[in-house]
Image (cartoon, rainbow, N blue to C red):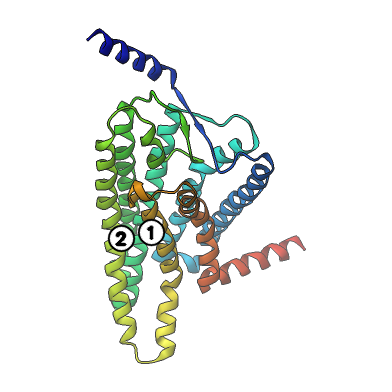
Amino acid sequence: MPLLDLLNKACMENQTIITEFILLGLSSDPQLQLFLFLLFLIIYVVTLLGNTVIMLVIRLEFILHTPMFFFLNHLAFVDICYSSVTLPKMLRNLITSQKTISWEGCIAQIFFFFQAACVEVFILSAMAYDRYVAICDPLHYTTIMKKEICRQLVGGAWIMGFLYGVANALPLVNLHFCRNNKINHYSCEIPSLLPLSCDATVTNYVVLLASSFLFGLTSFLLTLVSYIYIIVTILKIHSAEGRSKAFSTCSSHLIVVVLFYGTGYFRYLRPNSSSSVVIDQIFSIQYSISTPMLNPIIYSLKTKEVKEAIKKLVRQNIHYSC
């Protein structure tokens, strides 16, 4: 019994020591770190500029004051928040020797990461529903997609994001770490953090799996059902031009959905036994860093209205400058 008490005391002493974690990042090579810093700095700047331009164009162009672009405007804002959860800390760690993050900072990063990710998927679901109404029931589009309904859908997305973040961050508060404080990742993510705990983490894994299915699968099914109806309706259109025009209105959204859901679910829902640090980091970069940058590019290139509005804004700026 005294030996057990001694071991418990030693473990508790170690628990009080670990108040911060070391983020090992993507590489320990100084030259490669400098290259990665410049690469991810460019990505972050492009993300901020691209999404800001989308928001600015939608606000300034009256023709874009429709439900579809209302959701796109909020998606751009969420992408800025989503990217800002991890990238600034990652850039600081790449350029300095200080690669630590406090325990409180780690919990906060996990909460905001889950919140932003959940808000994004539910806004994507709202956009899918908007496209469903526009293509499958165009005569009632203006009566169904009212401003109040659109605001409620966006508000609901933020409420779901808050609940998803709390559900996964709150159980981490009671965990103790008395083994290792090195996270083999560039940010605090639950699959990388839980193996470091000296407590049983079964509950955390169950909560992660259950909440991912509850929130993620719900939003995914809403999107999937909307697109099933959309595809069926498009196939019933006789003219090839009509089918092409109908599909072009939702092709950019479909690309974003596939990129986000595919990499996110692969990272969080696959077994730990098949885990690979390099593969995990690649997929994590895709859904948390690349997707917020690619979204405004995809919508700018694939959506005619946005493309024309950006051209008009550029021409006006050139005219005023001259």
The residue that disc 1 covers is 261
Pointer 2 and pointer 1: residues touching (CB < 8 Å)? yes
Q: Nearer the viewer, residue 312 or 232?
A: 232
Residue 220 circle label? 2
39 or 163, nearer to the observer: 39
Query: Can you say whether 224 is above or below 35 in the image?
Result: below
Report the residue that reaches farthest toward the left. Answer: 1
Q: Residue furthest bottom?
A: 238
Q: Residue at x 67, y 68 (%)?
A: 315
Quadrant of residue 300 within the rendered picture: bottom right
Q: Which image quadrant: the N terminus?
A: top left
Horizontally, residue 322 falls left or right of residue 295, namely right
Give, as a three-letter code, the residue at label 1: Tyr
Q: Residue at x 41, y 72 (%)?
A: 250
Question: Sequence-wise, which precedes: disc 2 or disc 1?
Answer: 2
Amino acid carrying mark 2 in the image: Phe
